[in-house]
Amino acid sequence: MEIKMDLISEDRINSMGSMEKLRFVLEGVKSGNIMVLEGGLTSEEQMSLIELTMTEVDEDFPGIEMSGYPSKKGFLNMRRKARLTVIGPAKIMRTMKKEKGLISAIISAF
């Protein structure tokens, strides 16, 4: 089985509305792709993505695994956005570990 990874530029993500962005990510993950978002998602968008995912979980789609690096502290810490977000299907991304400067994922197609 092949595993596809989509590296999405911050420009492309920022050109989408919030719901369009979430649908784009969810459809990619439901297709079996690992989505790496430059610029990432806001914490609100991450929560909305999890909520949206939960409505679509079934026998064929067990959900998502997601990890990201938050932005550096900004003005009053308002609407902090991840600098990088990695999202993939839970059935192939067995483990995600985040350390300073590194996100590790074990991906299994079996």
Image (tube, rainbow, N blue to C red):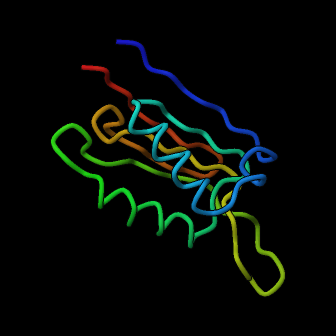
Q: Residue at x 36, y 56 (%)?
A: 53
The quarter holding residue 103 reads: top right
Q: Residue at x 71, y 45 (%)?
A: 38
In the depicted structure, whether residue 60 falls above or below residue 84: above
Q: Quadrant of the C terminus?
A: top left
Lateral position of residue 87 relative to residue 38, left or right = left
Residue 105 lies, in percent from the top left, at 44, 36
Q: Quadrant of the N terminus?
A: top left
Numbered marks: total = 0
Q: Residue at x 63, y 63 (%)?
A: 18
Residue nearest the observer in this picture, 18 or 10: 18
In the depicted structure, whether residue 78 falls above or below residue 55: below
Residue nearest the observer in this picture, 24 or 2: 24
Lateral position of residue 109 relative to residue 35, left or right = left
Q: Residue at x 46, y 51 (%)?
A: 66
Spot the residue most to the left: 59
Residue 59 lies, in percent from the top left, at 15, 41
Lateral position of residue 80 relative to residue 86, left or right = right
Residue 45 lies, in percent from the top left, at 56, 66
Residue nearest the observer in this picture, 12 or 81: 12
Lateral position of residue 105 relative to residue 94, left or right = right
Spot the residue most to the bottom: 76
Residue 46 lies, in percent from the top left, at 52, 63
In the depicted structure, whether residue 103 falls above or below residue 56: above
